[in-house]
Amino acid sequence: MSDLIVPIIVAVVVALVTYRGFLALSPILFSDKRKLHKRLSNEGAEQVVAASLNTARQITRTTQVKGLSGKLVQYRFFDNMNRKLMHSYPDVTLIRFLTIAGGIGVMSFMLVGLVTGSILLAPVAGALGGYLPFFMVGHVRNKRQQTIALQLPEAMEFLSRVLKAGHSLSTGLQMMGEELPAPLAEEFRRCYDQHSLGLSLEDSLRDMVTRIESTDFAFFVTAVLIQRQTGGDLSEVLGNIGGMIRQRIRLQQHVKAKTAEGRFTGYILVAFPAILFVLVYYMSPDYAGTMLHTRTGLMLLGLAFTLQMIGLFTIRKITTVKV
């Protein structure tokens, strides 16, 4: 089994490099698709939302990120990483996270180097160990964003009913922090606490946009800010926004159900060769063992694993339809 470590690790590294390269080239490869999407979308609304997000990010940089972390967020990579940390682990600072990632990477490098004594495996293990915290942050952040997106329609309708009952907007935010489920309730509770301590309601809402970073929620904040300047029936606007978000979620679930066959086909195509190889090795160890005990066989296994991962990623991109 020790001979399998090298091709497996090399295949994983090649797959990660291919994935990052695809992300880097996607703006060039899919420029026509992006132009079409921009023409079909509501450009005016997107500009308002983008302005709200940029303003909120500037407030966050100047008020929350200080010290060495404040200097690092001036760079795009660290700024994006800091926002992901705010979404997934709000209590962890950027410097602390980078220290943890670096520590795991160094420990993986030393452990694999001492156990195997391989010059090739140690750096690869260190890179994979350092990448693990970034993967966990992205996973937790995506899961949290999905949960908040599902809670938004009920939250909009709840606030609409509170305003119709005659309560003020600040009281409505307080009630949302007490009545709604987590994690959305925590964000509204923090917004109300900031407003109670002297921060203006507009800045508190913009700060929420930074922490949640959802287009639907940015529409809600934009509607509130416009209503506070021009007036109007905010409860009716919130009801319309809640209905729009609910219809979008229903459409997303419908599209996900329609593309489920393609996704499961990809999973089966990836799992079938591995299961078949295990069965063949169990029935005829000498025949299948050639792939495990020869250098050419190990290289072919590593190449096959890399191609399988590329195929799975391609199928996921094809079957993923953004609504």
Image: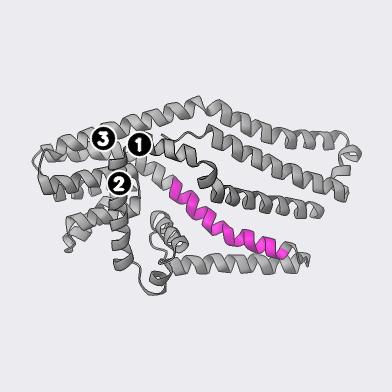
- What percent of the width, then of the height, locates residue 286? 91, 40
Question: Dot 3: few (<14), some (14–19), or many (≥20) neighbours within 10 Å?
Answer: many
User: Which residue position is annotated with label 3?
Assistant: 242
Rendered view: 174 above or below 158: below
Q: Is residue 106 above or below residue 309?
A: below
Query: Secondary structure beneath disc 3?
Result: helix
Task: Looking at the image, tell me whether mark 3 or mark 1 is earlier in sequence order.
Answer: 1
Residue on which disc 2 sits: 47
Name which quarter of the figure residue 230 lies in. top left
> Is 323 on the left or on the right of 296, as rendered?
left
Q: Is residue 127 magenta?
A: yes
Please, what is the three-letter code of the amino acid marked with disc 1?
Ser
- Label whose residue precedes the other's in the sequence (2 or 1): 1
Between tags 3 and 1, which lies in front?
Answer: 1
Question: Which of the pair 308/165 is nearer the observer?
Answer: 308
Identity, as a three-letter code, of the amino acid under mark 2: Gln
Magenta residues (range): 122-142
**Extreme-left residue of the structure:** 166
**Which mark is first along the chain, 2 or 3?**
2
Residue assigned mark 1: 41
- Image position of 208 with respect to 62: above or below: above
